[in-house]
Amino acid sequence: MPERSQWSWTGLNTGFWAAVLSAAWSVWFIVAFGAWVGELPAWTGIDAYVASFDPVGYLAWVVPCFLLALTFPVLMATVYLYLPADRRAPALVSLVFACLYGAVLGATYFLLGTVVRSAILAGNTVGLGWLVIGSPYSLLNALEGLGYLLMGLSMVFAGLAWRVPGRWRRATRWLLIINGVVGILGVIVGVLGSAVGSMLFLGAWAGTFPVAVVLLALRFRQDLRVAPVSSRVLRA
């Protein structure tokens, strides 16, 4: 059917680019955040935080995190539509968690990149300790943890749903699940007060998330090579 052919091409193309961009944003974030947090002094109060504030390094990791919050739900939507009907129940759960993640962290990083950054640059520090990332009492830090907990749940359910034939299917499935699990554990350990343990799990997340989404991109790309394109798509 032409409609199905058209979806096959557009859906796979959307999934491919969503996966590629998710990998790019995550690598950008990992590199930029590592550099930023390495220069971040131990928390002694908002005045010391503001004195050492680097707006360029700060935006360098906030921007890709915001972009990932926009892109990741699109990726999970394409995974849901890609899978056969008997695998769509866990994929739909994954999509729900991905949308919640996008809503929570999209708002969080938008606030960090606009309101919080502007307040720091203006020297308006009243009550700012409750908002900056780096403070152990930050409300936005707690929301960030909630967002990554939701993302971890999304990855786990995406992995449970990912039972498709083809090359790299098992590696893709297990990387999705492992990434989700380490993301969830990282949040739990952080809530329990172990900053070192949380950073270790963050390192494991950083080593598995880009690889997992690149494998999704490769699968979409492989199917794109054989997916028929309707005449209406060609005329467009």
Image (cartoon, rainbow, N blue to C red):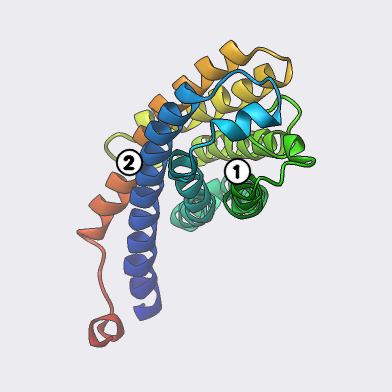
Point out the residue furthest to the right here: 127
At label 2, the amino acid type is Val
Q: Quadrant of residue 50?
A: top right
Marker disc for residue 214: 2
Q: Nearer the viewer, mark 2 or mark 1?
A: 2
Q: Is residue 122 above or below residue 139?
A: below
**66 or 42: nearer the viewer:** 42
Which mark identifies residue 90?
1
The residue at the point 36 percent across, 29 percent down is 171
Residue 134 makes an appearance in the image:
no
The amino acid type, in three-letter code, at marker 1 is: Pro
- Marks 2 & 1, CB-CB < 8 Å contact: no
Q: The residue tagged with tag 2: helix, strand or loop?
A: helix
User: 209 or 123, which lies in front?
Assistant: 123
Could you say which disc has been placed on residue 231 in the image?
none
**Image quadrant occupied by the C terminus:** bottom left
* Residue 66 x/y as whole percent: 52, 50
Q: Residues within 10 Å of mark 1 (few under 14, many from 20)?
A: some
What whole-number distance in Å separates the C-alpha atoms at marks 2 and 1?
A: 21 Å
Residue 4 image point, x, y percent = 39, 72
